[in-house]
Amino acid sequence: MSYILLLLLLGLVTLSSSETSSTFDRIRERLESSGKRITVVGHAEAPEAASYLNHDLTQNVPHKVNVSNQITKSIREWTPRLLALDPTCPYYFSEKTNASKPEEDLNLLSYLLGIESNKTLEHLFISILPDSYRNAVPLLSILRCHHLVYPASTSDTFFHNVKLIVGPGNTELPFEQQSATHSQLFCSLSGWPQFVLVDSAKQSTPFNRETFLSQEKFDNVEFASTNLAPGTCLYIPPEWIVGGQLNNSISLSYILKKIEKPTSDDEPIACTTTGETTIDNVDFDIDDKFNVTEIGLVVYFYQYLNPPMFDKQFDSKAFFQQLQSDRNISQLVMKWTPELTDLIEKTLFNRLDINQDGEFSIDDYFEVKRSNLLEIQNGVFEILEKLRMIIVGQYQELNATITKFTEQVRAAGVEGTTGETLDALIDELPDAIKAKLAEKNANVKEAIDKVKQKKPKPSTTKQRVREDDPSVFFDEKQGDEASSIVNQEDEEEEITAEPVANITEPHRTDL
């Protein structure tokens, strides 16, 4: 009886083990048991671009290249928290997930912070590399042939696409056959992903993942199994089959146009080496289409949460106080009217509180999904327009008051109640302007006396605009209206805005 019980227990353990075994492990084990293993050759150091072009890119053989000194040149360690610094990461989604299933439709931020918990997900994150990361990624020396980087025509483009791949835990890269016209260079930035590669030319039947799981023998199938250390790239030739287990890794995948082998070894492909650059200066067939300006306000307030620690959160009152202390906004607002206060404390806060838990925190950015992205964009745009119009209206009202006051001064001089009117007018000025008047010891009454003289012609000099101005809140026309009062200040003195509000510039990660 005890013997039978023991057999039953062993059977249950075996069944449980087989149920939890991943697809990747099962296919690898089947190939190892009856397939023909081949070795993945490696370059301990990156070869010259001309040599790599003629002896590696034109060969139908997988290989590895150590480029760790290049990948870590500007960023020493590619951590999830480093990439989460970028405020656009909540708006990128995986090509492998179903947008109609909210539980699957996780954004890049969710995957990056998911790596820290080593949680295996059903799908990996794979999507076009955001533009905001590209200025920190060097163009590898092995690819710096001038005609590859700067093709004569679009039909000759060598760089097709570059993708970001994030795999928390043991999330898998599904087995797929590469295109006949393109190869892939898979480079690990962080973590140790593992791969199995199969030569499809040695397959007697067309590739099918189910075949790998059901076929009994793989006598004529050549395969390779390898892993990648951070800073190492794996070249996958056209038409080869590849699958992987990502092992808590962050990687880049370059999709490259196939280069035909020269008909004669005596006629190598010419390669004039280019200088160092980053991949934001490379023209890819497929570009990042994400437009950050469409959701600028949500992106801007990401920094309130103190990335990458994300240890700050706000209720509506605290959020309003934080915004009041933000010089990018406070230097523009002349008066915190009930209308403006209500717009920020209620309308804007409720829009940012995406999960509706009464707090603005990093949890709200985890709730950004493709299904609600358009709603977020439209809601933010409406709030932004109201905010702009209230601020512009305040400046227009002040401008009208100054015009009326100037006319009174010209007619009657600075006498009687005019001085009181002047004091009231100065009280209406924004704090930033009053502070500048105090710094310069400006005598306002002397300035008014000058107004009674012949009015000077308006200057045609275009005002210099700082890169860190709060342009996120104004378009060009509205900005001119709102700055009509401030233009009288000294152009050489600058206000340093904290935090930076110019969201049209790419957010750098090479800090």
Image: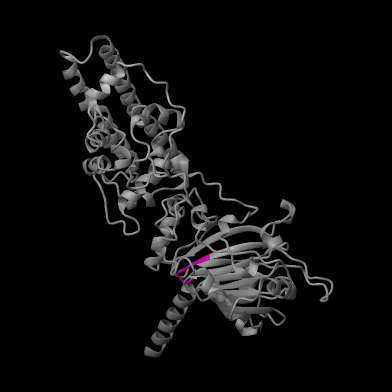
Name the quadrant of the C terminus: bottom left
What coloring was used for the rendering? one colour
Question: Between 481 and 129, which is closer to the camera in this rendering?
Answer: 481
Q: Quadrant of residue 459?
A: top left
How far across and down, in percent of the image, does residue 307 sit? Answer: 34, 56
Q: Which region of the structure is painted magenta?
A: 246-251
Q: Residue at x 82, y 72 (%)?
A: 267
Asked if residue 262 is positioned above or below residue 104 in the image, the reply reads below
Question: Between 81 and 94, which is closer to the camera in this rendering?
Answer: 81
How far across and down, in percent of the image, does residue 276 sit? Answer: 58, 64
How far across and down, in percent of the image, does residue 410 sit? Answer: 28, 12
How far across and down, in percent of the image, does residue 497 sit? Answer: 33, 45
Asked if residue 242 is positioned above or below residue 147 in the image, the reply reads below
Asked if residue 4 is positioned above or below residue 200 in the image, the reply reads below
Q: Is residue 210 visible?
A: no
Q: Residue at x 63, y 73 (%)?
A: 212
Question: Between 221 and 163, which is closer to the camera in this rendering?
Answer: 163
User: Is 406 colored magenta in this rendering?
Assistant: no
Q: Is residue 406 left or right of residue 388?
A: left
Name the quadrant of the N terminus: bottom left
